[in-house]
Image: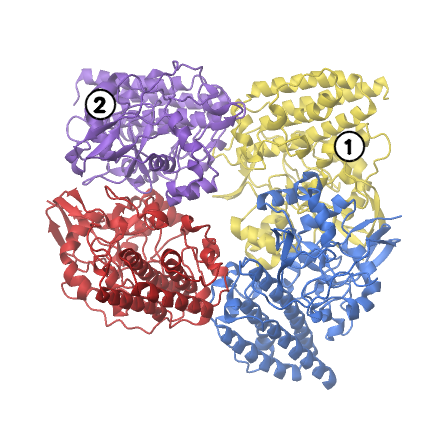
Chain colours: A purple, B yellow, C blue, D red
Amino acid sequence: MAHAADKAVLVDAFTTVRAQSERLCEPLVVEDYGVQPMADASPPKWHLAHTSWFFETFLLKPCLAGYSEFHPAFEMLFNSYYNGVGNPFPRLRRGHLSRPSVAEVYDYRHHVDEAMVKLLESAEPDIETRATLGLHHEQQHQELLLTDIKFNFGHNPLYPVYQSATVAAESEVGSLTFIDHQGGLVEIGADPAGNSTSRSDFRFDNECPRHRVYLAPFALADRVITCEEYLAFMADGGYRTFSLWLSDGWTWVQGQNIQAPLYWTEGDDGWLEYRLSGLMPVGGPNPVTHVSYYEADAFARWAGYRLPSEAEWEVVAASEMADDVAGGGNFLESGHFHPVPRQGKRMQLFGDVWEWTASPYTPYPGYAPLPGALGEYNGKFMSNQQVLRGGSCVTAASHMRATYRNFFYPPDRWQFTGIRLAKNGG
Amino acid sequence: MAHAADKAVLVDAFTTVRAQSERLCEPLVVEDYGVQPMADASPPKWHLAHTSWFFETFLLKPCLAGYSEFHPAFEMLFNSYYNGVGNPFPRLRRGHLSRPSVAEVYDYRHHVDEAMVKLLESAEPDIETRATLGLHHEQQHQELLLTDIKFNFGHNPLYPVYQSATVAAESEVGSLTFIDHQGGLVEIGADPAGNSTSRSDFRFDNECPRHRVYLAPFALADRVITCEEYLAFMADGGYRTFSLWLSDGWTWVQGQNIQAPLYWTEGDDGWLEYRLSGLMPVGGPNPVTHVSYYEADAFARWAGYRLPSEAEWEVVAASEMADDVAGGGNFLESGHFHPVPRQGKRMQLFGDVWEWTASPYTPYPGYAPLPGALGEYNGKFMSNQQVLRGGSCVTAASHMRATYRNFFYPPDRWQFTGIRLAKNGG
Amino acid sequence: MAHAADKAVLVDAFTTVRAQSERLCEPLVVEDYGVQPMADASPPKWHLAHTSWFFETFLLKPCLAGYSEFHPAFEMLFNSYYNGVGNPFPRLRRGHLSRPSVAEVYDYRHHVDEAMVKLLESAEPDIETRATLGLHHEQQHQELLLTDIKFNFGHNPLYPVYQSATVAAESEVGSLTFIDHQGGLVEIGADPAGNSTSRSDFRFDNECPRHRVYLAPFALADRVITCEEYLAFMADGGYRTFSLWLSDGWTWVQGQNIQAPLYWTEGDDGWLEYRLSGLMPVGGPNPVTHVSYYEADAFARWAGYRLPSEAEWEVVAASEMADDVAGGGNFLESGHFHPVPRQGKRMQLFGDVWEWTASPYTPYPGYAPLPGALGEYNGKFMSNQQVLRGGSCVTAASHMRATYRNFFYPPDRWQFTGIRLAKNGG
Amino acid sequence: MAHAADKAVLVDAFTTVRAQSERLCEPLVVEDYGVQPMADASPPKWHLAHTSWFFETFLLKPCLAGYSEFHPAFEMLFNSYYNGVGNPFPRLRRGHLSRPSVAEVYDYRHHVDEAMVKLLESAEPDIETRATLGLHHEQQHQELLLTDIKFNFGHNPLYPVYQSATVAAESEVGSLTFIDHQGGLVEIGADPAGNSTSRSDFRFDNECPRHRVYLAPFALADRVITCEEYLAFMADGGYRTFSLWLSDGWTWVQGQNIQAPLYWTEGDDGWLEYRLSGLMPVGGPNPVTHVSYYEADAFARWAGYRLPSEAEWEVVAASEMADDVAGGGNFLESGHFHPVPRQGKRMQLFGDVWEWTASPYTPYPGYAPLPGALGEYNGKFMSNQQVLRGGSCVTAASHMRATYRNFFYPPDRWQFTGIRLAKNGG
């Protein structure tokens, strides 16, 4: 059983994370809560409800004696994809639910919050583990909240402003430098052993187990690719040169008539991009973002390099972690909600943009999913997706670590995704 | 130029119709205003804005000196299908516009209202004609407001209630009787001549000109088909008997797995239907509604009859008009918003449900659309659709007349559509 | 019972029509028999088999004692759309059937032919009626044979030649003249009474019954529209001018990027078209063909006229019939297989191109389909299609008459379809 | 420059491989050559032409002085996907090309053959390398020839027989045994160095370079899964148990209503399967085949095991190679064209069925595609596909080796694909 002090820490974390979700919605008007502008971008209301559903389904119903569910239909309405919990409401129709109202969803949250605090105060270790998972789950949805709101606003001809610009004046980022690594037999991944109820020790099942990987010598770029560099690719006909593209990527580019990153639009005086602070000129030294895996891969080929594997990324990142996550990285906490140019000489591995790796998302050797319906959290998605690393400007710093594996389909680009280059080494 | 008294009448009509649209939205919460649950069912907010756009585009901008448009982007955002006015915002994405907010749309309405009253008070006849058209246009959208809200609520697992039930207890409707008509050379349609600025003389271009049609002797059922009668068709395997269906209808039934009218769902104790007053047992003597042309046609074939042509319907209706529209019909004004059983011995030609006719929607001999962009109002839709007659429980009585031609595609059934039978006479 | 002489006539007709189908396939190589280049264009092999299936299903199996079916799977494989006969092989996969081979299909034909001659020699009147229907059915498929082969060859980059050019040098056709008709109460359609077993008296159920129609005065163009006239429409931006198009037509033009009639392609020196005799320059005075209803309708609007109704067409055609069908018309028998310029002063009502009318395909008053599965022949298609009149250069003259109603969907254009103008009269 | 003897060997190999393609088509009738029963299954005629196109495009046109191309349109018609060569004829319409005829395609082959022999007799090393690639390319298409013919015949209700059954009586295969491997730092892949013009040294660019991989201890099943074992999975509700499936797999199973391997159909007395020798009962001890990656993965999960990685497979296979490929394996040369039960105690690693691995198809570290258009051969497909290993009953033995990497999309199952299990060791 956990100590009282640990419990207080967990309750505090719970309260903080839950409040953060609501704070992110403060700039919204009621109308913004319900819109699903594409299949993958759920309405903010749905995110607020689904994260509460997670606690209700996996903690309150099974563990809190006497808990009374908020509404019998919510089990189905706010289930995302857990077949083990029943038949979810169709994903494509999340934006059609004008009811429950926003106020009712907030009531639902607070009903769950109250019960959760009660549960956490008397919590067994197993409950703490699940609650910690639930908080990381909620942090993932905070990121989606912002990217989904951005997709909505960025496709509205009125270009609503989510927040006024907070990013400092852009500066020079310096030329791209490659950092050598000698390769060899390295270890990546995390071990589930130890007190994983503690938030600082948390890791998802898909990061485990820690295991050995052999790497040939390689070198990793010391920062991500800038808009200016990406504009050179575009100016050189990158989107029209089939030999730069994977076959599926070329089909995508031609079928969707892709000509620039998402949110870019050609203005009278050059390219504009929609940011959460409105429509504005593309910033040269800013990291390019909202590119698909296909675009990242094509850019790398054009530049004469390649994308890193996730193992290459991780072995370098593991040593950089302490500095960057703790302080230097541009995460959700900075409040910028947009990637910024590399600051000084730091390696820019964490924050700003998720970096597409060349690694498809597959299980680590010895991987075992969580038991029960929670086993659907990560494992069942291990096909057809690519791993991304490092977190973005809308990822919580407290959610990030060097072993963290994010994953999206190759054409996805509504997340803050960017490009890091690598090359074969010596 | 119209007399002052006529102007006052028109201003009064304008104020009344515009207020009616807003009154119909009173039961909504803000969240309900933005939902587009399918391509054809626009968000209430869009209806409120588009009807204002109509006055702004076709009256205020061209005719009111010094008029200042409310917002430059609204010309595109709230254009429905008038290519002559520019490139409309994509219909399929109307539900993605969380902005402008509901409050801004109401501001837009009131901005337009104020300017319109000013314009009407000094109006030339031509302006009165267009304003009258705009009011009929708005009445059409009032009907859509209710059917679109119903589609949203009727597909939400929470089955929200728009209003509490207002319909009186259901009674016997009497057996179906056929009224003979000797046919011959008859006249249908309306003439554009005369003072069409007066609302009572109004007719759409598609009702004109009045023209002769030869009819063989026929007979028309004296009421529409009830749910009880339709249930007999279903119980007899109507939906599984290919020989009852048009080929395109059979493809539709099988492709969509159609088994009952829209909004019907099988409960433990029989069929339930969603009404604007909630989910409840299907009412036996109530008119069956929310059926497609294919279903209406298949039912008629099963029953050994046929659907009437629009000319057959109109020559009978022309004589019934006075009574029925003025008083007996169940229109929007009754506030029921659901079809009711036939009352007493009236013929039930007007109100309750739009009646599918066997007539495709085509121009009358000598038809000429309005000049300019307003010519797109009706004429360009004259292919692939069927004519419906009589108005429904959500049509304004002041909008209806015997010559009125409504039109929808054969599979459409989110309107209050129903079935009247006919047979060959003589 | 028919006289022996009548029987001989019928047997002779049977032999002639059946041989004609095979003669039309003589220019084919085995490979050509199996291709289905789009859903609507069936493989020649399928046409040869299906027309035999018709006789086997509706005559031999029910009427010829001791008939032994050719192959048990053929009942399903070569059923087109008769649900009353069972579940047809999917239309979209007709081109996937490399077996039965072409030789086997010819064996099937000859097996059926032999049995049919036996049956016809002892035929009861009812059998004669059905056999006559079967022959008209086969003539319809002869037309489809040629249009489907043309679709295949016309989309093959090698542009195979079906036959060498047979059309005489093109001449001036004279300016378009309108022939007045005073309208009034007219009769159209045909009566099923009389000896319908005789081929000359044959009519499909959809042409019946003869009935009265009232027509306002009108005028009909004395010939169909030429390529030269259609090129003027194109040069004037016809395909880019939304106001000329029905709404569904405009969606079609934009969605399919339509810029010219089917089979037209832009060459270095102007437009080329694929004919069954190969790729060649578009012929100016030739009737324009392979246009959709939407194109015909848009052209008429651009020219300041309209398309005729089917009744208008028929009352004029009824008087022209004798001359034109008997001799002047360019039908299948001419062997040109392409429309030719109007010859001399004849009205050019029959042959050359099917003329789109403004009339949707609906039942005539009092229409009754044939009993049983044969009732599926025509009746179930009476929605969403338009009537075409007059026959084309690949219609058998012996198949044509003034009351004949063909029907296709508005976007269809792989048939030899063309444009006749009309206008309001008096 | 190669010695005369080497040249003779190459000419002999060329003649042998080219003749083999034609021999595989001997059982076909002309009609079979043109059918494309789905997008991925090209017509036999197309395979015969495309393999000739490969030699014409990459060898004859650039290298043989005075070579005259067979037909100018063939460069476009028979290009598969080489954008570097021009704009290929649309893949989806390959089955619409009734011309060129089969005889013309054979003429094309012989025209190319004659010129190739001339070229080979005077060949430079670079030409020999390309010619060898062309022969391996043709062997790949020989495999596709058979799987595409099978798809055609297996979906024809007549179930044509390609060849009479040749497979010996089925015998017991023995229970599944796992062979341990201690893992560690191993090498996989092939090196491009050496005399790669020799056929025995040939490898595709995607097998290179040879590189080190670290493997944890594991064990590999000694044979592939049988139909009997797969039937147990089905009987246990495997296709209805979501928890066994990857998320994309579950969507596929439900969307396509998958209930058994491809070509299986339920008969009165149990499951039947279509083989190239006709429809027959599923053979219990035969390897299950025509399963997708999703099915293989779900089966492994159900059985409590997993699929092997390609590195695990290769290190085991490298030692088994000599025996199995040389003699024991059931390859194309056996003429069975269907997987057979494991014979005796051999490990059944090569032949019979391609084995899905858990490895997505990605470049090896240091991978470099061939220069020019030939670089499109393999490299551009390195996303969204899975690696398969071992070759099948329709793969030429002379085409196979332990380092060979085949790749298909997860839902593909018209190849002879099967299941090998693995588990974690140590």
Amino acid at pointer 1:
Ala
The percent position of residue A183, horizontal first and vertical second, equals 17, 34
Q: Kindly identify which chain the residue marked by label 2 belongs to.
A: A
Residue B360 in view here? no
Residue at the (24%, 18%) spot, across then down: A326
Q: Is residue B269 left or right of residue C7?
A: left
Q: Nearer the viewer, residue A226 or B325?
A: A226
Mark 1 lies on a secondary structure that is helix
Which residue carries the number 2 mark? Answer: A321
Q: Nearer the viewer, residue B236 or B44?
A: B44
Q: Quadrant of residue A403?
A: top left
Q: Quadrant of residue C121?
A: bottom right
| Real-space CA distance between mark 1 and mark 2, rounded to the nearest whole angstrom | 79 Å
The tally of labels here is 2
Position of B137 relative to D121 (above/below): above
Q: Is residue D6 left or right of residue D375?
A: left
The percent position of residue C83, horizontal first and vertical second, equals 56, 62
Q: Pointer 1 and pointer 2: residues touching (CB < 8 Å)?
A: no
Which residue carries the number 1 mark? Answer: B326
Name the front one of labels 1 and 2.
2
**Image quadrant for the C terminus of chain A?**
top left
Residue C236 in view here? yes
The percent position of residue A156, horizontal first and vertical second, equals 52, 26
Position of D349 relative to A406 (above/below): below
**Image quadrant for the N terminus of chain A?**
top left
10 Å neighbourhood of mark 1: few (<14), some, or many (≥20)? few
Residue at the (11%, 50%) spot, across then down: D180
